Amino acid sequence: MKKITLKDIAANFGVSISTVSKAINDSHEISEDLKAKIQEFARENHYKPNQIALSLLKRSTKTIGVIVPNILNYFFTQVFYGIEKTANGRGYSIISCISDESYLKERQTMELLNSGTVDGLILSLSEETQGKGDIAHLQDFMDSQIPMVMFDRVSEKVNCDKVVVDDFEAGYNTTKHLLKTGCKQIAIISTIYNSSVGKLRVEGYKKALSENGIEYSERHVVNVGKDDDMQLLISLLVADEKIDAIIALDEITAVDTLNILKSKAIEVPDQISIVGFTNGRLSKYVSPALTMVSQHGKYIGELAANILIDRIEYDGEMPYTTKLVKTSLIERESTKRIMGFVGQ
């Protein structure tokens, strides 16, 4: 039997969760009649208050949990930096956790943080969670009345605050830029094909191709799994197709792609242009320096932390919000310049 929550009781009586909580705790702010009805309903349905959640209403831990899928990804490193800087400035400490793209590890970590350790949680979903579509652990966390902000990789099935990158537009604008430089056979290399952000970037890419009268080919989207040989897959791609541009959906993949092309004596950008995602340090110092899409990770972290802390500290109900962050294209030496070429 599913455990009844404050949210369930509130829905039954058509009142707020705050009203139910006050009634169960015998507050004088609630009418005696409504209080008695709510308390009787709670007893009949075997409601057991979450003592940890109740204690958090009275005593703040001044700690925020952060779960990221991959700390080696420069984007998540920048987001974490923004979260930590903002949280520290507002008097909060951080517990940082890594799901390593694992659904099980993400679920176990959330269960641990749901034990009274934190006042709130900032989370980006693992690729495995998004692939499975199982969000029961997210809903359980929300039912515990601990605020949560999701960023970048989010679930539309969970009603909470969100900070997302406009990944569809990023894929669209990146492809459009390459088309304007004269490229026509544009490929994508993706190690995040199961994630929402990876799928959105590919959808943006498809739209840009369609608008320019270029037929989409599945062969031009190369999905690289953990056990796949990237060098072999890219070698087959450039051998079988007349590729003149590659979009890598993360920074490490972009650098690996550059090194693989150089090892095959393919000149970048004269023969093949490369654009990567996440404007990290690696992309600046390889040769040629890589054109990258900046997702403004530090700003996303600051924004997510401020939204979460505002919700933690506000004594009342606030509507959930979704903030959309635009990307920027940082042009470097790995792509051709736009010189009079006019796309359709």
Image: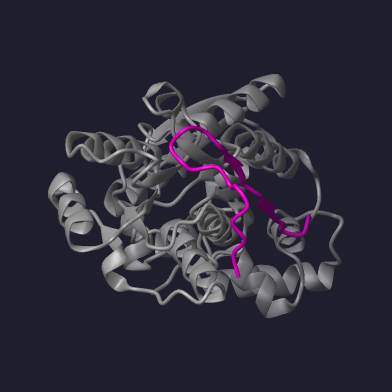
At 60% from the left and 72% from the top, the residue drawn is 8
Tell me if residue 7 is in the magenta stretch. Answer: no
Decide if residue 126 is in sight here. yes
Decide if residue 225 is in sight here. no
Q: Quadrant of residue 98?
A: top left
Q: Is residue 315 left or right of residue 342?
A: right
Tell me if residue 329 is in the magenta stretch. Answer: yes
Say which of 193 and 119 sits in front. 193
Q: Can you give x and y, in whole percent of width and height, for residue 50 in the image?
A: 53, 51
Say which of 338 and 230 sits in front. 338
At 46% from the left and 25% from the top, the residue drawn is 284
Q: Can you give x and y, in whole percent of width and height, for residue 123 in the image?
A: 50, 45
338 to 136, vertically: above or below: above
Q: Can you give x and y, in whole percent of width and height, for residue 36 in the image?
A: 74, 70
Pick out the residue farthest to the front.
Answer: 340
Say which of 138 and 197 sits in front. 197
Q: Quadrant of the N terminus?
A: bottom left
What's drawn in magenta, residue-wise? 318-344
Which is the main secondary structure of the residues drawn in magenta?
loop
Q: Is residue 36 left or right of residue 198?
A: right
Q: Can you give x and y, in whole percent of width and height, for residue 68 in the image?
A: 43, 40
Say which of 311 and 72 sits in front. 72
Q: Quadrant of residue 218?
A: bottom left
Q: Quadrant of the C terminus?
A: bottom right
Q: Is residue 320 left or right of residue 234?
A: right
